[in-house]
Amino acid sequence: MKRVAEPELMETKEQVISYSEADFSEGEDNLINQIDYYLLKNKIILGEKDLIVDLGCGPGNISEKLAIRWPNTEVVGVDGSKEMIIKAESNKKISSYRKQLNNLYYVCDDIKNFELSAISQKKEINLLVSNSLIHHLTHLDDFFKTIVRLSNSFTVNFHKDLKRPLDEKSALELKTKCSSKYNNILTNDYYASLKASYTYKELKDFLLKNNLLSLEVFEDCDQYLIVYGKV
Ligand SMILES: C[S@@+](CC[C@H](N)C(=O)[O-])C[C@H]1O[C@@H](n2cnc3c(N)ncnc32)[C@H](O)[C@@H]1O
C-alpha cells in the first residue's frame, strides 16, 4: 500500500480529547517493559539525574510511565501541539500518581527545532523515546536527523510505531476492529495513521543509505516496528 502522509501535529481539541481519553495502557506498559528489558540486557542503569526525553509525548501517558518506572531520572515530554501539552500538564495534575511525577516536565516544541539547551545546559540525554511518532513525520529524514542531533554516543534510542499494512483491505480490517473500541474521531485518526506509517523495508533502507547501521529495526507482533540502539 502506498504511503499517504498525515498532518504532523494533532492540534484540534476533539482529536486531543479522543486520544487522551482512550485506554492504550496495555501497549504503553508493553513499551515500558520492552525498554526496561533492553536496558537490563545491556547492563544500562538509569540513575540519579539521568535525562529521559519522550518525543511527540502527546497527552503524556508514556512520559508519566517513564517518570514512575525511573523515579531518580528527569523526564521531559516534547510535543509540538499546544493542545496536547495543555492536556499532558492537566493529566499530570490530576493523576493518582501525581506525587511521583515531580521529575516530569513538558515542553511545547516541534521536534525538528527542539534543542537540548532548552531544557538543560549541562545534561545529555540518556534515553530518547517515542511512541507512535515516526509516522507523523512527513519526511523520515526529519525524524532521524532529530534523533541523531539529540543523541550522543551513550544515548539509548527506543522508538515504537505502527507498521503500514500490506494493502487497503488489511488497513480497513484494522480500522473496523478499532471502531468497535474507540469513537469515530480516533478511528479515523488511526486509519490515517496506518496509511501514513512506514514499512520495515523503508526504515531499514533508510538506515542503510544513511549510515545509521548501529540502529536496529524489528517487527513487533505484526502491527508495530521498533527502532532501537545507539547512533
Ligand atoms: C499519536 S500521538 C502519540 C502520543 C504519545 N507518544 C503516546 O504514545 O501516547 C503523536 C504525537 O506526536 C506529535 N507530533 C507529531 N509530529 C510532531 C513534531 N514534528 N514535533 C513535535 N510533536 C509532533 C503530535 O502532536 C501527537 O501529539
Image (cartoon, grey):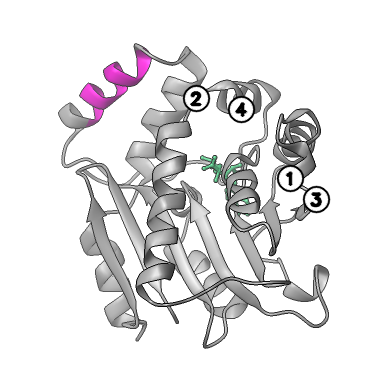
Q: Tag on residue 6?
A: none
Label 4: element kind: helix
Distance from mark 2 CB to nearest ligand 1 atom below 8 Å: no
Q: Cα distance, mark 4 to mark 1?
A: 20 Å
Left or right of residue 225, residue 104 in this image: right
Amino acid type at circle 3 is Asn
Which residue does the image show at 43% across and 59% down from the upper left? Answer: 35
Residue sitting nearer the eye, 44 or 59: 44
Report the residue marked by disc 1: 100
Distance (Cα) linking label 2 and label 4: 8 Å
Q: In terms of depth relative to the viewer, which is nearer, 24 or 103?
A: 103
Q: CA distance from mark 3 to mark 1?
A: 6 Å
- The relative height of residue 145 versus residue 32 in the rendered view (above or below) is below
Q: Which residue is mark 3?
A: 102
Answer yes or no: do the residues labelled 4 and 1 have beta carbons within 8 Å? Answer: no
Of mark 1 and mark 2, the one earlier in the sequence is: 2
Quadrant occupied by the N terminus: top left
Discs 2, 3 touching: Cβ within 8 Å: no
What residue is pinned by disc 4? 20
Label 1 – label 2 distance at C-alpha: 21 Å
Return the mark for residue 23: 2
In the image, which residues are magenta?
A: 171-179
Type of the residue with mark 2? Asp
Question: Mark 2 and mark 3: span between their CA atoms?
Answer: 23 Å
**Does residue 137 appear anywhere in the picture?**
no
The answer to whether the residue labelled 3 contacts the one labelled 1, judged by CB atoms less than 8 Å apart, is yes
